[in-house]
Amino acid sequence: MNTDDIQDQLESLTISPINVKLKRLPRLSDYIPDLKSYTNPLQHNAFYHHSDHDGFYISHSDIILRQIVFDFSGNFPSSAPHLAYHHAGPRKEILFDPKRVRAAIVTCGGLCPGLNTVIRELVIGLWELYGVREIFGIKAVVTIYVNNMTRLNPKQVYIIGGDGTLRGAVQIFNEIQRRKLNVAVTGIPKTVDNDVGIIDRSFGFQTAVEMAQQAISAAHVEAESAPNGIGLVKLMGRNTGHITLDATLSSCDVDCCLIPEHDFYLEGKGGLFEFLDLRLKENGHAVVVVAEGAGQDIIPRPDSQTQKTDDSGNPVFLDIGVWLKTELKKWWEREHKGELFTIKYIDPTYMIRAVTANATDNLYCTLLAHSAIHGIMAGYTGFVTGPINGNYAYIPMDEVAHAKSPVNTNDHKWAWVRSVTAQPDFLRT
Amino acid sequence: MNTDDIQDQLESLTISPINVKLKRLPRLSDYIPDLKSYTNPLQHNAFYHHSDHDGFYISHSDIILRQIVFDFSGNFPSSAPHLAYHHAGPRKEILFDPKRVRAAIVTCGGLCPGLNTVIRELVIGLWELYGVREIFGIKAVVTIYVNNMTRLNPKQVYIIGGDGTLRGAVQIFNEIQRRKLNVAVTGIPKTVDNDVGIIDRSFGFQTAVEMAQQAISAAHVEAESAPNGIGLVKLMGRNTGHITLDATLSSCDVDCCLIPEHDFYLEGKGGLFEFLDLRLKENGHAVVVVAEGAGQDIIPRPDSQTQKTDDSGNPVFLDIGVWLKTELKKWWEREHKGELFTIKYIDPTYMIRAVTANATDNLYCTLLAHSAIHGIMAGYTGFVTGPINGNYAYIPMDEVAHAKSPVNTNDHKWAWVRSVTAQPDFLRT
Amino acid sequence: MNTDDIQDQLESLTISPINVKLKRLPRLSDYIPDLKSYTNPLQHNAFYHHSDHDGFYISHSDIILRQIVFDFSGNFPSSAPHLAYHHAGPRKEILFDPKRVRAAIVTCGGLCPGLNTVIRELVIGLWELYGVREIFGIKAVVTIYVNNMTRLNPKQVYIIGGDGTLRGAVQIFNEIQRRKLNVAVTGIPKTVDNDVGIIDRSFGFQTAVEMAQQAISAAHVEAESAPNGIGLVKLMGRNTGHITLDATLSSCDVDCCLIPEHDFYLEGKGGLFEFLDLRLKENGHAVVVVAEGAGQDIIPRPDSQTQKTDDSGNPVFLDIGVWLKTELKKWWEREHKGELFTIKYIDPTYMIRAVTANATDNLYCTLLAHSAIHGIMAGYTGFVTGPINGNYAYIPMDEVAHAKSPVNTNDHKWAWVRSVTAQPDFLRT
Amino acid sequence: MNTDDIQDQLESLTISPINVKLKRLPRLSDYIPDLKSYTNPLQHNAFYHHSDHDGFYISHSDIILRQIVFDFSGNFPSSAPHLAYHHAGPRKEILFDPKRVRAAIVTCGGLCPGLNTVIRELVIGLWELYGVREIFGIKAVVTIYVNNMTRLNPKQVYIIGGDGTLRGAVQIFNEIQRRKLNVAVTGIPKTVDNDVGIIDRSFGFQTAVEMAQQAISAAHVEAESAPNGIGLVKLMGRNTGHITLDATLSSCDVDCCLIPEHDFYLEGKGGLFEFLDLRLKENGHAVVVVAEGAGQDIIPRPDSQTQKTDDSGNPVFLDIGVWLKTELKKWWEREHKGELFTIKYIDPTYMIRAVTANATDNLYCTLLAHSAIHGIMAGYTGFVTGPINGNYAYIPMDEVAHAKSPVNTNDHKWAWVRSVTAQPDFLRT
């Protein structure tokens, strides 16, 4: 195929300039004058030699576009700025003398597949690549404060935790900036639910989907083996249905996928009961997966719990799985009295969080940890590292701390679920 | 955080227009006059209702940018055109009457994790979403020809196979176009090695990496349990080192990763022996992974094989794993006579290809199959579907058939391996 | 080592004769006069040749001892008869002409790992080894009757099901004998709980233990990751604690193992709370596993349920797992108000039954199915096949149908659990 | 069913006395006069209380019968003595003061699934059950001598290793006895091949079979996917075919199983080629599994290797897998020139040894370790612990060190393989 052929296949689009805006990242040198810089010690490895053009070092001018899907018919290019982020990776010049670095690795909250890999790779990367010799770990059950932190006198702080932790890390970072301390801070979002925005996904998520698929597969086998068998699986996800959604698309055995972002109802035309009735008639069995945050507003809440909130001030979650199981039984008893019926209910939550990360997540965790180290060594601070469209980027921490990542049900991802399951849209037309 | 705050964080970049070029996709209506169009039957589902703005249908003007990492310092925007592709997904208007469609699913060549999912989802998608009732399978051992094909009189042809198969599919497509037949053709690349260009990755690849990681883990445990133990793992990849590379980054137990795209040598300064000597001294054991296509030009080829080629005219591959094992033994015997030494060699090839796809690959295969169906139904032909930067696109088939996907050792992906393993660059400086 | 040495090591025991009693097995020839016999078609295989002494065929006089552990100090040999059973395996002479056999494979009730292997091997064994060409399957949801059965006119009936099914099979067999029908019946016990007597274990049990161990491991990881963390796992076993017991011994992470055969209590000296208090103080976490049938008489039963029985007349089971979780929370709140505490509760039931059998169970299922076929072909009827002390035996069906297999807490198996966990004996001394 | 009914089913056998001989176990008190005895500290646990009849303690008079399958027709009871062994488990009285015990755990040789469990449980059992506080580990690469041993001054020695190690342990034990040292020695056989006699199986074996089954399954999938496809799997087992045999019975996909204990040949009537020819014609594919020690005398041995022996004096093993693969290819080329043919060869050896033990092996390893401790504490020495007919026994160490465990091809276990695969008997009739 020669160049002309290729040209023939191109359809020219006349477009206006794309107005790209780069998300600026704070650096220690922004507020600490005369900060000394050093050559990256990777440069001194006896076994390899970097040329300026071998792609090993990433420069400050390497950026990643966030939006990559456009509709050129009308709203492309839109007047809204197109955001870009710094590309993660080792910088040739760093702002720390590794020999004098004290690094703190702070972890908060519960388990997540891959957490051990992140911690191990932070330690290995700091120790072996940069020669850092003072690394200590802090297991923070609830909160960390700047004062605690400064007492330990770290130069680099790696904070691994959920959204609450990230918001705390932003405050720590702000205070450090205010005091003009020579301390760099990075956050590593830990949420198996994948409910953090901007980045492609959070670590542990793929492993959770793998385990969720196994639970769905078990539910399917159970459902198939009984007359009018229903397999019901409750999956993690208080705010978002990502695990439920991906597990649905992975397993192909799901008849209906219920998530917090999309309301549903049980009774009446277009409701869950009518739909399941049809599926049981057609196939003899059905599988329903439900995210733990789904349907919270249709479960009758006892008066005593109406205003009940947990320690963080969030309303107490009601158990959608157990409630749904009960309602399905009542429905069948009402509508199909005397006919055989079986529900098998699976809640694999605590078998998911404790498993070892799969290869995909391990690779992710390794690059995440090393990206974080390279970023901090380069003097960036107040940032989060993570993949954007498959490439690792540095993102301002406060932006990540406040970004949500709901399933966009007006987008194509949810459409896949609808087209694969052919489930109701619950729109009460 | 109010809008002003966000604006403060943006760094404006004044850039020239990006010259986006869309890869045009052939459609049946290009060469068949007066082709009737139909409403997508998804529109008639009793349980859901599409509005024009719910993102369910994808339009012809939805495109995906291919290049998303830029260096804005000098070469951004470059004068080279920035390529874009059509977004995959269901179209509201289709060019087939599903009731009269005969669909052929053609598979060529060996096993690949996920192959069964692709086939099953093609059948389910055609049958359940579109109501197609004539679907047949063809298992092509070697080659398929247009005449064979036309005798079976399919209207839609889904061809699943390796690069040879894809090139054959292009010829079939060209001939169909020449004869102006009302037959749409799509290709689905099947290569566990991930050696196909443009798309993010091929199906089965993630599962192969998972299994490869297990083999590496076993090699590591074996190496650790013996004094001066070396674990040597040969992984799939004749042309590319993708599996080897990703498994290396997933496992963190690898000391040296050898791939076809990067030459290496054994003896002398900066060579493999010197490096392993050092690692054995430091750690007492080492793990080497090697892609089957690596080092083909340093294995002494007996005269009889110098010109030997296989049935496809490619030079016969020599077994890098067995050769390396032998050379390492000889080296140790020569340099460390009398010292204990153990090599454990693992070749997991045929245990990798036969496993069930993991959740990540299953999800991929489902979207792949459904994307292919939606594209064909919309009248696109001569195309391949696959993810570009995480979004499913339609790509001209001849472009994919000729695109290679080597590991770019001047790019950042290889740099990760070098920084994680700290292995030699084998540059003989 | 010569023979004298060996003799030196032997300590002679003068013992009275062991009074061995063989459990007689019914045969069709017992009540059908002049039944023709045939040479086993295995004899005609072109590829192998049996001599009379190669151990291939088993004879009627090959028997297996049931009791093999003795205390020679006083009660050995006891006056009680020592039972023996016929050894399972192919007989040289059979009582069916395979070409004229109609075989029915009847399955009742729920899932069990290995069920598919048993069915497949029954079909393969009948078809390939004996040349039977009429094999049909019956999925009995509830009950089967002789009349149903005879209408289908089978000559051989293989009934796979739980204890209720086996008792039904005994009735069918008795009726067949009464009518002197030329129909042989065998039962294959299906109970993942391993609650059937005489045989070493039931199929699926080892796989269930494997999965249970995974659940315990997850609970342990969860418990370890939280201050004062308790992992609570409920395992299958309404009548017996075999799964719970074996999973406890397999996992080594269990602090307390609660089974139906051994009462326990929560409050007071030597109770569960006191014990857990101590373990949390010593280790910071604890893991409790409980069989679903444990503690049924200490859970307060609402009046409405006092007399409630299920369809089979058994008292309704209360959920020990959920109750225990609640009680533990209340206890902590009462005794340790304000101190951090976490319980993670795992109920893996429906993820256990649906998994594929492991190698151990697959091997078992294969030998089970083939033993059953060989036995029936030899004309035995009204029997169950299963391993006794590791060797496959034929056992009268009514004996198995009425044998229970509780964990003997006055025996050494339970002692292992006590010595491994050092848990309380709950004896309220 | 009343007692009379049961009696009716019993067939009386008049038999002569069984002449049971108990294998005497050496005890420290045999040659050390006035050895003090102590109450087992298990007696002092705050949470449980042993009565004399609760089965917790095992006494010296508890024995296990080894032979349990008899042919009562002629050779029962035989005049040969029927062997019995001491039952393993905690003794109420022990011969060590745990507080003053120094325990050495010695491991020799390569990996085996479950090895870590054995070591961990030895440590936990000594520490937690008996309160031993001096425990140290020795990793012996090659040999250990009494002098080394005594220098470390242990009171209890737990030696884990293969048959060579066990024979060395016997020598150590003999020397200790000769010197009348107050040191107890126990051996724990470590051989994944299961080639040790008397005991039911060695630890790690079940896990190896599980992995072997996976390899066979992969070979089967590969073979099925190609025209005239042969899957060839080489499994561990130099002296015995146990892994190969059990994996064959577990997998049901095997057409031919080749083991060291049974000769086979390739060419001519009744040979492997003729058999595979038939299977390929019938089924289109075939699976062959071969133990690494099979067929050693039919592989042409180059002159240079005729007398070659390895370091231990054993003849060098030739690679049956690679040779068979080559011979099969030559045969097909010769007999079926031009017809498609594929062999996929899998050697999973080093992926088997490194995996984590499954639940069955973990349970085994736990009981093994605790049995060993209880035995040593009771003053037994020079013994091995292991299951006999499913019950843990103490066996004189020299007996185990010299017992082989070949597959008995004149017994029923091999008959199962023959009846399941219907493979040739290779008897050249």
Image (spheres, coloured by chain):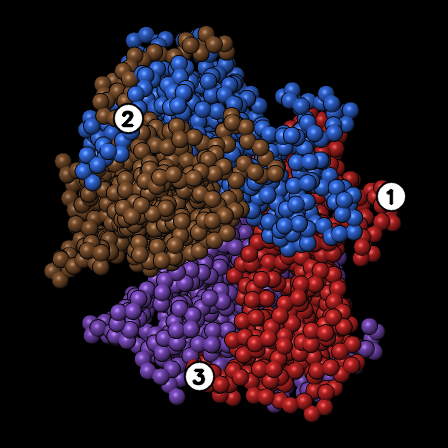
Chain colours: A red, B purple, C blue, D brown
Give the chain letter at badge 3. Answer: A
Residue at 35% across, 84% down: B269
Give the chain letter at badge 2. Answer: C
Query: Same chain, marks 3 and 1?
Result: yes
x%, y% of residue C210?
A: 50, 43
- Label 1 residue SS: helix
Q: Amino acid at mark 2?
A: Ser
Give the chain letter at badge 1. Answer: A
- Which residue, given by chain and number where applicable, does mark 2 sit on? C12
Q: In the rendered image of this protein, does residue D236 appear above or below residue B372?
A: above
- Label 3 residue SS: loop
Q: In the image as oriented, which residue stretches furthest toward the left? A: D303
Residue at 83% across, 78% down: B4
Rounded to the nearest angstrom, the CA distance separating label 3 from label 1 is 69 Å
Q: Residues within 10 Å of mark 1 (few under 14, many from 20)?
A: few
Q: In the image as oriented, which residue stretches furthest toward the front? A: D34
| Mark nearer the N terminus (3 vs 1) | 3
Q: In the rendered image of this protein, does residue D144 appear above or below residue D79?
A: below
- Which residue, given by chain and number where applicable, does mark 1 sit on? A304
Residue at 16% across, 50% down: D298
- Which residue, given by chain and number where applicable, does mark 3 sit on? A46
